[in-house]
Image: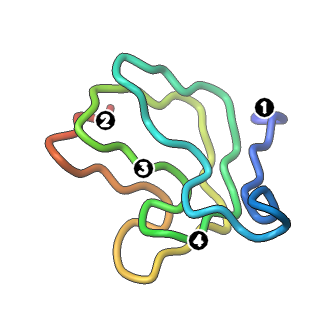
Amino acid sequence: RNVCVIDGSRSDAGQPTQHVVQGAEGARLDGFTLRGGVGDGGGLLAQGVTMSIWNCIFRDNRASRFGGGLLAVGGADVT
């Protein structure tokens, strides 16, 4: 399970990305491991969207202030 890994640790010109995934309206994220993000919402940033997450692992993400794994802001509804 969760054999598909999205690794943001070297995805931005060899440097860690701010957000491994950015949420989208109506999206369903299912069966991924998200790792290596370094911004607020390092694993997933959901801004003002309604989306769902199923069978996912958030690993080795970090943030300077908020939501190393996941940050939902602006009225986002994440289930």
Q: Residue at x 78, y 56 (%)?
A: 11
Tag 3: amino acid:
Leu
Tag 2: amino acid:
Val
Q: Residue 25 sits in which quadrant? A: top left
First-in-chain label (1 vs 3):
1
Assign the N terminus to one quadrant of the image: top right
Q: CA distance from mark 2 to mark 1?
A: 22 Å
First-in-chain label (4 vs 2):
4
Tag 1: amino acid:
Arg
Assign the C terminus to one quadrant of the image: top left
The residue where tag 2 is placed is: 78
Residue 27 versus residue 35 in the image, above or below: above
Element under disc 2? strand
The residue where tag 1 is placed is: 1
Q: Among all residues in the image, which is located at the extreme left?
A: 75
Residue 47 versus residue 32 in the image, above or below: below
Is label 3 in contact with label 4 (beta carbons under 8 Å)? no
Residue 68: give x, y in percent of width and height: 48, 68
First-in-chain label (1 vs 4):
1
Q: Residue at x 81, y 34 (%)?
A: 4
The residue where tag 3 is placed is: 45
- Residue depth check, mark 3 versus mark 2: number of the one nearer the observer: 3
Residue count near mark 3 (Cα–Cα under 10 Å), binned few <14, some 14–19, many ≥20 = many
Q: Among all residues in the image, which is located at the extreme front?
A: 13
First-in-chain label (2 vs 1):
1
Residue 48: give x, y in percent of width and height: 23, 38
- Residue depth check, mark 2 versus mark 1: number of the one nearer the observer: 2
First-in-chain label (3 vs 2):
3
Q: CA distance from mark 1 to mark 3?
A: 23 Å
Left or right of residue 56, residue 5 in this image: right
Q: CA distance from mark 1 to mark 4?
A: 24 Å
